[in-house]
Image: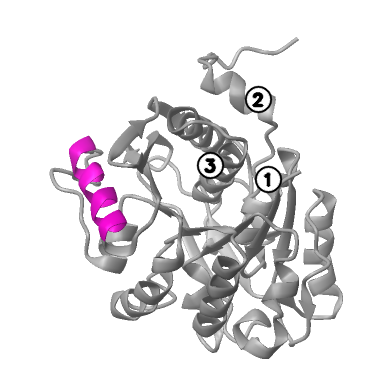
Amino acid sequence: MKRIITFGEIMMRLNPEGYLRFVQADKFEATYAGGEANVAVSLCNYGMDAAFVSKVPAHEIGQAAVNELRRYGVDTSLMIRGGDRLGIYFAEKGASQRASKVIYDRANSAISLAKASEFDWEKIFAGADWFHWTGITPALGGELPAICLEACKAAKKLGLTISCDLNYRKKLWTREEAGKVMAELVPYVDVCIANEEDAKDVFGIAATDTDLNTGKLSHEGYISVAKQLTERFGCKKVAITLRGSISASDNDWAGMLYSDGKASFSPTYRVHIVDRVGGGDSFGGGLIYALLSGYDDQKAINFAVAASCLKHSIDHDFNMMSVSEVESLAAGNTSGRVQR
C-alpha cells in the first residue's frame, strides 16, 4: 500500500446553518478541516495509507481535531502536541450572485508557532512514497517557510514524490511574500497543482485570453501557464483546475494535466454547488491517488476532476466519496439517478 505524508494546519470550521449569513446566525456548526488534512482524508477514503503531520494543542479541542482525522483512518501518530490554540475559520456559504466568504482566526495557532527542531523529517518520511503540502502552510509565517524547505529537502533526498498546491491566500500574505518564499520551495516539487489564479498571484504567470468573471477559459492560455511553471521550476507535472464561475451556486468545472510537453484535459461538468470549500483539496487527493495507482495522464485528470466535482455536492471540507463512485462519474454516469 502506498504511503502519503501531508503537512499543514488543521482548524475548527464554524459555519452558520444552511445559507444564513454571519450576521443572521445565532448558532454555528463546528467541524474540522485544513487543506492538507482534507487531502489525507480523501486518500484514506480511497484505501491508501495517509498520515497528517501538524502541531495541535494538547487540550480537548486539539484532541477533537485529531479524533476527527482518526475517524476516517488518517494516521495521526506523527502529530505534535503543544501550543495554546487551534486555528479557526468561519465559512459563510454563498448562493446565486452572493459570494461565499471566509474569515480566519488563526493567528498564534499551535502550528504557526512551531519550531523547526520539533520535526524529524527523516523519521517522518520513513516508508513513505509521497509528500504533499500547500502554499497555505508557509503563509502562516514564523519558522514554517524554513520548516517546509527542510521537509522538501528531506523528501527529495529520500526519493519521495513531492506535490504542492500553490493555494495563494491573500488574507495570509502578500503576493510579494508568496512569490519570494514559493520560488525557493517549488523547485523541489514534482507535481504542481494550481487553480486559475494561483500562478498569476504567486509568480505573475497569467493565462491569456481568459476572463474569470465571465467564465471564459482558454485551453491554450493554461497550457502556456503549465509550460512556464515547468520550465521555470522543473516540475514534472502541472495540474490546473479550470473553474468557470456562472454564479456562487453554479460553476463549470474541469481540469488539465500537463507533462512532457503534452496537455490532457478532462470533460467539463456543470456543477450545482452544495459547498465549494475543499473542492481544490479533493482534486489534489484524487490526482495523488490516480498517479500513485499508475493511471496515465488522461485517466488521472479525469479521476481528479470527477472526484472534485462530486465534492461540490458534499457539506463541509472532507470529500466523502469512494473510488467506485468517482470512477462511475468519470466513466460518464452523470445523471444523478437513484442507485438501487
- Residue 64, located in which quarter of the rendered image? bottom right
| Residue 127 appears in the figure | yes
Q: Are marks 2 and 3 in contact (CB under 8 Å)?
A: no
Looking at the picture, does residue 89 appear above or below residue 40?
below
Q: Residues within 10 Å of mark 2 (few under 14, many from 20)?
A: some
- Residue in view at x 64 percent, y 49 percent: 316
Question: Which numbered disc, 1 or 3, marks the residue that appears first in the sequence?
Answer: 1
> In what element is the residue under mark 1?
helix
Q: In the rendering, which numbered label is found on residue 325?
A: 2
Q: Amino acid at mark 1?
A: Leu
Upstream in sequence: badge 2 or badge 1? 1
Q: Tell me the mark number nearer the camera, choosing from 2 and 1.
A: 1
Mark 1: few/some/many CA within 10 Å (<14, 14-19, 20+): many
Asked which colour scheme the image uses, the reply is: one colour
Q: State which quarter of the image contains the N terminus.
A: top right
Q: Give the CA distance from mark 1 to mark 3.
A: 10 Å
Q: Which span is picked out in magenta?
A: 218-231
Q: Is residue 117 left or right of residue 264?
A: right
Q: CA distance from mark 2 to mark 1?
A: 14 Å
Which amino acid does the dot numbered 2 rest on? Answer: Glu
Could you say whether the residue bearing mark 2 is in a helix, strand or loop?
A: helix
Which one is nearer the viewer's eye here, 338 or 310?
A: 310
Residue nearest the observer in this picture, 172 or 115: 115
Q: Position of residue 214 (x, y in %)?
A: 22, 40
Mark 2 or 3, which is nearer the eye? 3
User: Which badge, 2 or 3, comes first in the chain's sequence?
Assistant: 3
Residue 228 lies in the magenta stretch = yes
Q: Is residue 264 shown left or right of residue 200?
A: right
Give how far across and how far down residue 96 sits, in percent.
Answer: 39, 40
The residue identified by callout 1 is: 43
Confirm whether the magenta stretch covers residue 179.
Answer: no
